[in-house]
Amino acid sequence: MEYFKEAHINLTNNSSSRIRRQLMDEINWNDRIIGIKGFRGVGKTSFLLDMLREKHPTPKDSLYINLNSFYFTGRRISGFADEFYKRGGKLLVLDQIHKYPEWAEELNECYDKLPGLKIVFTASPVLRIHEGNESLKNKVNIYYLPGLSFREYLNYHTKQNFKNYSFDQILENHVEIASNIIKKVKPLAFFNDYLKHGYFPYFLDRKVYFTDDLLKHINLALEIDVTYLNQIELKYLSKLRKLLYIVANEVPLSPNVSKLSTEIETSRATVMNYLRYLKNARLINMLYTNGDEELQKKPSKIYLHNTNFLNTVVPENHDNATYRQTFFYNQVVSKNNLKAVENYDFCVNDKFFFNVGGKYIEAVDKTSYAASDRIEVGHGNKIPLWLFGFLY
């Protein structure tokens, strides 16, 4: 216990918050058990340490634990939590809970036997917390930590404190919002850099190694998050890698499942399962005509999850249209639902029809919108593409 307390103090004292994440204000910290899921490298550990510094500045009643520690190969979480609780502990922070095999049973026991203890944990995006663990459905509240929004990235680089806006606020007031922002900064001067290496916060310390770090995490996601946690034999890893590369080269891909099954030498059903695994791992996004209602059916289009993946997996792809649509999907879907619709690129929240394009794109009609790249301020139903990076 003393070793972990000392490690907690060292971590919180010797690191500092450089980008305050929007999720910090969206979580109900009064909940007894909070789960934070997110892709490798989005900053889950930094987020936990920021939370501890902000909300529990004195470590007397809080404790950070990384379950990578070999100590927990011989110690139950519930037993450790019980000891911590009896010593006056009130908040136990468990990083990488998916590293502990019996995590669900242990969380359940902590909830039932330690009513005054709160637990915050992080997990892989593919970890099934509620699915298959009926007893945890009303006990664990789950949140997702995405990569940096363009707003968060811009705030860091310009030392500003721009607020986020709802989708409806941007539609109604985009001219005023964009005009106020460009009085202080030039968003377009930072936008292309964000598309290449701004979603993941590696640039804070290791920008020169950004591509290497991201490739490593993509491969770890395939090897562990997708294969291990979905109980797929490692001999099939090469098929998953090939499928991801095919998608990356053709996004936005309107998938021909028969063709994909031939290319990676597996069945159509397996291709559909693989696509679902890649989506759950936050490696790709899939667009359906009826939203998530058709998850068992073939998607209308497939995108890589974010533009940093595009720049890393297929650096030779310089197609602006692909980057623009991938950015729009990635930023907008964080707080809204998107669907495929005929004659437009996206339907947002079942009623707003969008085409995404360059400087000269215009809305098709008075009831639709254009998300336009390379403009600072829009007009009417023409909105700057970069402004959709201010949704979180």
Image (cartoon, rainbow, N blue to C red):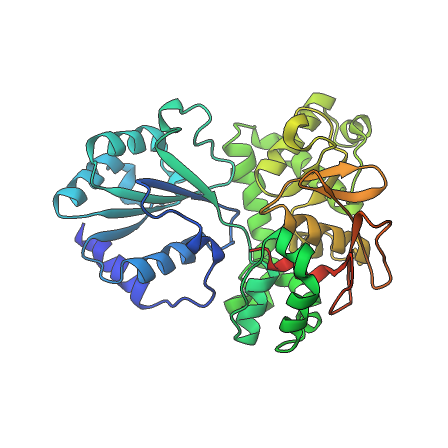
Image quadrant of residue 184?
A: bottom right
Left or right of 75 in this view: 254: right
Left or right of 125 in this view: 193: right
Image quadrant of residue 273?
A: top right
Q: Which one is in front, 63 or 340?
A: 340
Quarter of the image with the C terminus is bottom right
From this view, report whether residue 287 is shown above or below residue 321: above
**Residue 315 image position (x, y, % from top left):** 74, 57
The image shows a total of numbered marks equal to 0
Residue 363 makes an appearance in the image: yes
Image quadrant of residue 178?
A: bottom right
Left or right of 381 in this view: 111: left
**Residue 274 image position (x, y, % from top left):** 65, 31
Left or right of 53 in this view: 243: right
Q: Which one is in front, 130 or 349?
A: 349
**Residue 327 image position (x, y, % from top left):** 69, 54
Residue 319 makes an appearance in the image: no
Q: Which one is in front, 154 or 205?
A: 154
From this view, report whether residue 287 is shown above or below residue 47: above
The residue that appears at 55% across and 60% down in the rendered structure is: 164
The residue that appears at 87% across and 50% down in the rendered structure is: 364
The residue that appears at 18% across and 45% down in the rendered structure is: 84
